[in-house]
């Protein structure tokens, strides 16, 4: 019996059986084998995918935990910064409150010292007022009258008393007694008191320099005259005009009359003259206006000096900026 050999599997079989049946078997085997291999491969892929999913889950969990830790850390940092800021603000507020408290205390001390200088509430305050008044008269009002003599008077009493001895060409010509008052109410006893002091000190004129003025004091006037006693409102320009006028009148009276009492009479008559009184008032107003103008001019001058300094700084800054961008000036 003739046999044939399969070219694929090298198997021999009878020719009568035919090749077709064998090939079909081979196909079935190949299909089964491919199916088995495919299932095996699919199983491997499934296992691999499962493993990748597990790994991804682990990575996601790690990332999630990391994010949670990061958010927690950032939250802690923010909270810490907030706490630091709050602490800094509280410390700043505390320092500011302490500074404000210190400023209040300092202002209170300054005000107290000012009252000690300006107000006549005690013997020490009176001494302080004497110093201020004496300095103003000697170094401001009569700073060019080097022959005149100034001294404190009435130690240990309320108020600041200064005795001014007018000296002209080496000869004494008269005395003016000043008393500074800075209380809330005017005491009518001050007038009789200064008259007594004038008698003791042999003063020709008495001037009460006071913040509180009597009810009969005319509001628009700088002073009220009662014979040779003047009640001058607490205005340094008014005091300056009154003091300088009295000095000139004492000198003039001394030159005209030899009678010692002529000084007193001359001063009284001068101030009782309505025209002279009006002139004094106008002089005081002119001096006040001039003083205000001087203050304004000084303010403008100081501002101009500051602007000039600022322009110098800005010019230097301009040169520096030009130098930075390569712009240089020829020598």
Image: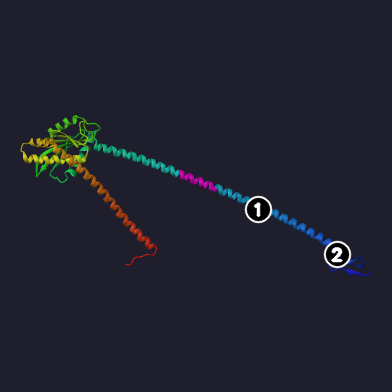
Considering depth in this image, is 74 or 255 the residue closer to the camera? 255
Quarter of the figure with the C terminus: bottom left
Image marks 1 and 2: residues in contact by CB distance under 8 Å: no
Q: In this view, does 125 lie to the left or right of 258?
A: right
Where's residue 86, x and y in %?
46, 43
Considering depth in this image, is 190 or 127 the residue closer to the camera? 190
- Residue 299 is covered by the magenta coloring: no
Q: Quadrant of residue 212?
A: top left
Residue at the image point whose x is 41% and y is 43% from the top: 92
Callout 1 secondary element: helix
Q: In this orientation, does residue 174 appear?
A: yes
Label ID, residue 17 = none
**CA gap, disc 1 and disc 2:** 48 Å
- Residue at the far right: name it: 1
- Residue at the far bottom: name it: 2
Residue at the image point whose x is 61% and y is 51% from the top: 63
Q: In this orientation, does residue 203 appear?
A: no
Relative height, residue 198 to residue 30 (above, below): above
Mark 1 burial class by Cα count in 10 Å: few <14, some 14-19, many 20+: few
Which contiguous range is marked in magenta?
Answer: 73-86
Judging by the rendered image, the residue that carries numbered circle 2 is 23
Where's residue 310, x and y in %?
32, 54
Q: In this view, does 159 lie to the left or right of 62?
A: left
- Residue 79 is covered by the magenta coloring: yes
Callout 2 secondary element: helix
Judging by the rendered image, the residue that carries numbered circle 1 is 56
Where's residue 114, x and y in %?
26, 38
Which label's residue is closer to the chain start, 1 or 2? 2
Mark 2 burial class by Cα count in 10 Å: few <14, some 14-19, many 20+: few
Where's residue 289, x and y in %?
22, 44
Q: How many labels does the image show?
A: 2
């Amino acid at each position: 019996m003739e046999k044939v050999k399969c070219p694929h599997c090298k198997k021999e079989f009878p020719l009568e059986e035919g090749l077709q049946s064998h090939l079909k078997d081979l196909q079935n085997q190949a299909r089964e084998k491919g199916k088995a291999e495919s299932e095996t491969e699919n199983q491997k892929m499934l296992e691999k995918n499962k493993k990748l999913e597990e790994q991804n889950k682990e990575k996601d969990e790690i990332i999630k935990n990391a994010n949670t830790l990061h958010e927690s850390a950032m939250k802690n940092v923010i909270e810490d910064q907030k706490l630091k800021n709050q602490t800094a603000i509280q410390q700043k507020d505390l320092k500011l409150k302490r500074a404000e408290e210190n400023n209040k205390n300092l202002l209170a001390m300054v005000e107290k010292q000012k009252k000690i200088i300006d107000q006549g509430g005690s013997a020490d305050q009176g001494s302080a007022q004497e110093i201020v008044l004496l300095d103003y008269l000697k170094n401001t009002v009569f700073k060019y009258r080097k022959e005149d003599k100034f001294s404190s008077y009435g130690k240990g009493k309320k108020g600041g008393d200064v005795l001014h001895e007018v000296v002209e060409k080496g000869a004494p010509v008269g005395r003016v007694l000043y008393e500074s008052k800075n209380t809330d109410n005017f005491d009518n006893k001050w007038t009789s008191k200064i008259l007594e002091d004038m008698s003791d000190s042999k003063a020709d004129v008495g001037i009460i320099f006071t913040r509180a003025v009597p009810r009969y004091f005319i509001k628009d006037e700088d002073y009220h005259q009662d014979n040779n006693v003047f009640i001058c409102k607490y205005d340094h320009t008014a005091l300056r005009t009154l003091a300088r006028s009295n000095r000139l009148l004492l000198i003039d009276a001394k030159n005209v009359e030899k009678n010692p009492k002529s000084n007193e009479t001359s001063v009284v008559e001068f101030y009782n003259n309505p025209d002279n009184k009006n002139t004094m008032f106008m002089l005081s107003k002119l001096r006040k206006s001039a003083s205000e103008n001087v203050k304004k001019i000084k303010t403008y001058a100081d501002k101009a000096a500051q602007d000039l300094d600022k322009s110098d700084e800005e010019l230097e800054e301009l040169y520096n900026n030009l130098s930075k961008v390569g712009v240089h000036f020829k020598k």
